[in-house]
Image (cartoon, rainbow, N blue to C red):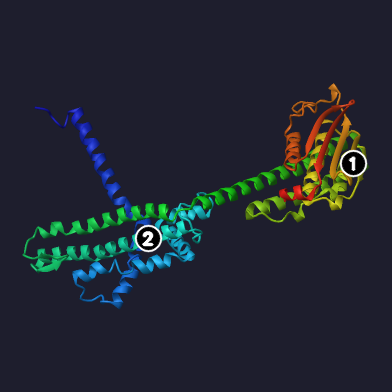
Amino acid sequence: MVDVSTSPTALTALTALATRVPRAARTVVAPLTRAVTYTRWLHLLMGAVVAAVCGLVYPGLFGLRPADMLWLPVLPVLPLVAVAMVPATRLAEGLQARLLLTPGEHARHQQGHLAPRIAAAPSASWGDRGRTALWLVLRLEAGCLTALLSVQLPALTGALVSAASQGTSTVVMGVRIGGHHWWYALLAPLPLAALMALVVAAGSLMTAAATRLLGPSAAERLAALEERTERLLEHNRLARELHDSIGHALTVAVVQAGAARAAGSAEFTDRALAAIEETGRHALEDLERVLRLLREDTARGPADRPGLTDAERLLESARAAGSTLDAKVSGPLEELPGPVSREGYRILQEALTNVLRHAGPVPVAVRVDVAADTGLLRLDVRNPLPGPDQSRPGETSVGTGLGSGLRGIRERAALLGGEAEAGPYEGEWRLSVTLPADRSRAHTMA
């Protein structure tokens, strides 16, 4: 004979059973504690409203015979199909399904964390109308069944309790509950449990059906994907602009501070601080603009972004950092298409930043030319190659052409249909960029 109290195997089995039972109980009870269970129940009951309205007209909701109850889920079918042909019906049903069938998921979608499984848009095709009609009929039938059982099953529980306590005879769902039997009280919770199980299962099935019938069509999914891609591209562009602007400001500040410390002149220090202040102010303006766009997550017009007509600001910043500039700007810059002017400004900014970062305050030759005959914008920036003693630890060699700044310049030029070349040329480091100033091509980047 085995002593259960001392047998390790028996104790392990009892412990496992003791933990399994509460886990199973939690699994059964958990759906009853979720708000989504009751919002789905409400959604199911609302599906029977049309049948109830038809029943009020004929034959009336009181004194219904079984044959009359069979007609209630059938009479509204044709009117519902007709209503489904109205495009706005799909929008209304989609919004209601989102709010009641997937309330938590709907909130997360509103915050941008999830793609919607249920569309909220008018019907755009006959396929959308057909799926909406099928959804309305399915919702009608499920609503009628749920409404019927939501009334009859609690009534059956009440009849069992009444029969157990008083011996009252009652007819529920075509079944007579009579006799004075105490064990009826043990059966009383079963109809309520069956009702809750039905509500949970029906709510899950209706959610799956809504995903299938009211879900985004292929065209809507494609449009959403294109919108997301455009948003990501816009964010990447803003991040690149922020990198260029802040990088330029920090480079000027570092160079100016180092030069002021080395010069040991109060007058030079004052000029350096003024240059740092001016460059930092422009960088803060760019930072505030980019952060505002990111917060609002909207594609604002690019009118407030600087263009090549503001190139003098960059040249003054480079001069203030100690560089000797030989700058020549020619051609009608104000007639350049907006995208070409703005991207040209950022390319020139990154070019001057690279000179200051890798070569220091050296003489720089800048040429900006808009050719009237060829319709091309040419940017040319040259500076002396740094000697071996000028290299600083941790910096990218200027001769490699592998830095993120040069890569960004090439990407900007390629997106506009132009090209960029960088490398040693006749004893100097040269950056040459050619951009088409043709409006029809440039407007595609607006």
Residue 111: % across, % down: 53, 53
| Residue indicated by mark 1 | 319
Q: Can residue 381 be seen here?
A: yes
Comparing 418 with 254, the one in front is 418
Mark 1 belongs to which amino acid? Answer: Arg
Residue 264 vertical position relative to residue 344 in the rendered view, above or below: above
Instruction: Kindly identify which numbered label has been placed on residue 39.
Output: 2
Q: Residue at x 35, y 65 (%)?
A: 47
Quadrant in the picture for residue 161: bottom left
Is residue 89 found left or right of 237 in the rendered image?
left
Residue 432: % across, % down: 83, 35
Residue 366: % across, % down: 89, 39
Mark 2 belongs to which amino acid? Answer: Thr
For the residues labelled 2 and 1, the Cα–Cα distance comes to 67 Å
- Contact check, label 2 and label 1, Cβ < 8 Å: no
Q: Residue at x 18, y 31 (%)?
A: 10
Tell me which label, 2 or 1, sits earlier in the chain: 2
